[in-house]
Amino acid sequence: MKYTSLAMLAAGLAVVAPLAANAQGKVNLKFLTAWDDRYQGTRFIAYRYGALIKKASNGRINMSFSGPEVVKFKQQHQPTAAGVFDLNLSVAPYYFGTTSLFMAFFALPPDTERWREKGYWQYGDKEFDRFGLKLLAHPLGGSAEDVFHIMLKEPIKPVAKPLTGRKVRGNIFYKPIIEPLGGSIVTLSGAEIYSAIQKGVVEGAAWPVLGAVNFKWYEVAKYMTRPRFGSSPYTVTMNSNRFKKLSRADQELMLKVGRDLELETPGVFDAATNEEIAQLKKFGVKETYLDPKTAESLANGFKIGIWELALKNKTTTKRAQILFDMAKANGDTP
């Protein structure tokens, strides 16, 4: 998105959601989300953060929300950094072209308190600062490495490369899963998946377990792969200049609530994931299993593949290497 377009968008949004605090000390913030409310992550993280901030500030700080219907999911990093929006909920694959460092957090132990203890969280905050953003929270979409699966039209066979010849919705994150299994990646937004599977553009979709019921993918894809894989770190960022304009007390509040959110979300996502699986089975979706040797090999290679992606971006390689060395010193690398 070009800056001229951003300026026009900012002017339009300013009419309905003023940026500045008003005379009564109220603060109105514009929150951009990578997904609409059909995806639970939007509600569990963005909407929840807004509600917690509103409560903690006694209604003084309020947030209005926009999603991919306003700015496409892969184009949200820049308008937030430029100040068109104040906050953004996203994931590392969506801004991979800007910085690949945050891909590494998919390969770290799923424990945000450990990330803070070992300095990974702070290092990520420093990386965002390069792009005019402040890290407020790095919440996880579950407490274990079992957040993702692939929904398919047809079951897989117990062979080394069961996705051979199949096109699967994914993005750069899923490369260490889909390609070793023989599949090819087609990049689509969540809203495009149903139609793509229905029309045969793809034969399945890699996605967190959460989302399939609300998007109704169970109507067009009747199988889900097992075992599940991967952890799912999200990022909640704020425009740095906007953050600096807040009072010191409000800055501390935003960060405290961000940490509280990190502690809350894994359990919320776990419960919702278990309910989602039960619902999918109720709608007739069956589990289809990888060959045990293939599954073991894939699990071992997945984190290695994620680190390779994090180290791949030439503009980020040196900084990602520093994070890798930190993690290795702490025994947090594969």
Image (cartoon, rainbow, N blue to C red):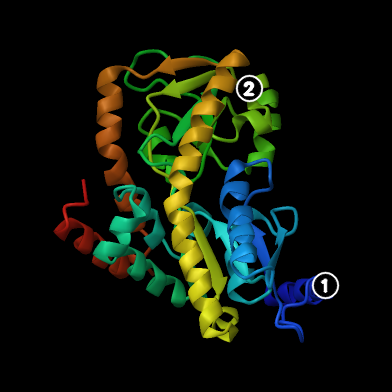
Q: Quadrant of residue 186?
A: top right
Q: Give the percent coordinates (x, y) of residue 72.
A: 67, 55
Q: Amino acid at mark 1?
A: Gly
Query: How many numbered circles are shown?
Result: 2
Q: Which residue position is annotated with label 2? A: 218
Residue 331 against residue 56 in the figure, above or below: above
Q: Residue at x 17, y 57 (%)?
A: 330
Q: Which residue position is annotated with label 1? A: 12
Q: Is residue 128 visible?
A: yes
Q: Residue at x 50, y 44 (%)?
A: 171
Q: Give the percent coordinates (x, y) of residue 241.
A: 57, 83
Residue 147 against residue 12 in the figure, above or below: above
Q: Quadrant of residue 189?
A: top right
Q: Amino acid at mark 2?
A: Tyr
Q: Give the percent coordinates (x, y) of residue 63.
A: 69, 65
Please tell me whether mark 1 sits on a helix, a strand or a loop.
helix
Tell whether 16 sits left or right of 98: right
